Amino acid sequence: MTIDGANRALDDPDAGLLAFSAVTDLTIERCTVSGSSGTALALSRVSGRVTGCRINGAAGSGLAVIEAVGLSISGNEITDCGEAGVSLTRWTPGEDGSLVSDNRIERIASRTGAGGRAGSGVLLSGAGAVIVSGNRIADCAAGAIHASASPGLQLVGNSCLRSGGTAIEVAGAGGALVSGNVIDGAAAGIRLSGGEDRPAVCQGNVVRALAPAKSRRRATASASRWPPGQASPATSSRTRRSTASMPAAPQGPTASSPRPTCCAAGGSASPSRSPRVPAGRCCRAT
């Protein structure tokens, strides 16, 4: 089934183009939801599974879930959304028990300017004991995975590519397990905070190609403006000024150079009359 909102205004953008509330054992499979001017798929107090769906072009979140009860979200393709790919929220922090696995989440922007962490691939707020595993999350404006007040998380085996901010960030990380993730390209890799009562475990992750967002943009702009091997005019000018200001190397002795004096061992210093130092004599400058 395909549902296309054609980007028309919704009465309540947060309610979603397609919405379900208080449903037990809900199953949504192989559906396409596109062109929502708000959230694409909104679920509230549901259990069941969402699998094999394509969600794209939402101005808000692709899949927004509130107060889930053991929901399984797997094998979906969620792209080109304006706030978050998958969002799990509980008004009172507690055990959620949802599974977010094997999804492809790409090109998540931060168009709405909403609070929290708009621009995240997977966004968790108050949702504890959630397992996020095996996802490919790429090109997110803020980061791949962001969680707050969500204890007992397991973030395992995710591929996080080209994040605009911190790739994986967990605030209130009590009992969290962050393991086996690959982070390639981000402003920062992994950030854990809080959770002093239940220590978090962070192990076996691969983090590479980190660079602040401004530095990456500056390097990209510079590389695109000047051909390889050719310095910019500003660099060439600085090089010329630096070269011109360097003092010339001395070419020979000057009047102010110290004069050598030679003396026999134990004797007094006396000027040498020969350009050569006699054998057995020492030479020092005065």
Image (cartoon, grey):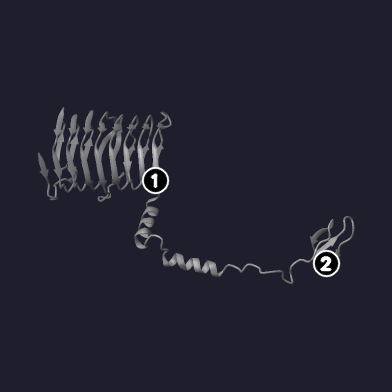
> In the image, what residue type sits under mark 1?
Ala
Using the image, tell me which numbered label, if any, was put on residue 23. Answer: none
84 vs 283, left or right, is left
Residue under pointer 1:
209
Q: Where is residue 20 in the image (x, y as percent from the top left)?
A: 15, 35
- Between disc 1 and disc 2, the foreground one is 2
10 vs 194, left or right, is left
Residue under pointer 2:
274
Residue at left 24%, top 37%? 103
Residue at left 22%, top 33%? 73
In this view, 127 is above or below 4: above
Q: Is mark 2 on a helix, strand or loop?
A: loop
Q: Quadrant of residue 76?
A: top left
Specify few, some or many for label 2: CA neighbours under 10 Å numbering under 14, 14-19, or 20 or more: few
> In the image, what residue type sits under mark 2?
Ser
Specify few, some or many for label 1: CA neighbours under 10 Å numbering under 14, 14-19, or 20 or more: few
264 vs 105, left or right, is right
Q: In which quarter of the image is residue 150?
A: top left
Q: Can residue 257 be seen in this view?
A: yes
Residue at left 15%, top 38%? 19
Quadrant holding the N terminus: top left
Q: Earlier in the sequence, mark 1 or mark 2?
A: 1
Quadrant holding the C terminus: bottom right
Q: Distance between the residues labelled 1 and 2?
A: 66 Å
Q: Is mark 1 on a helix, strand or loop?
A: strand
Residue at left 14%, top 33%? 28
Q: Where is residue 104 in the image (x, y as percent from the top left)?
A: 24, 39
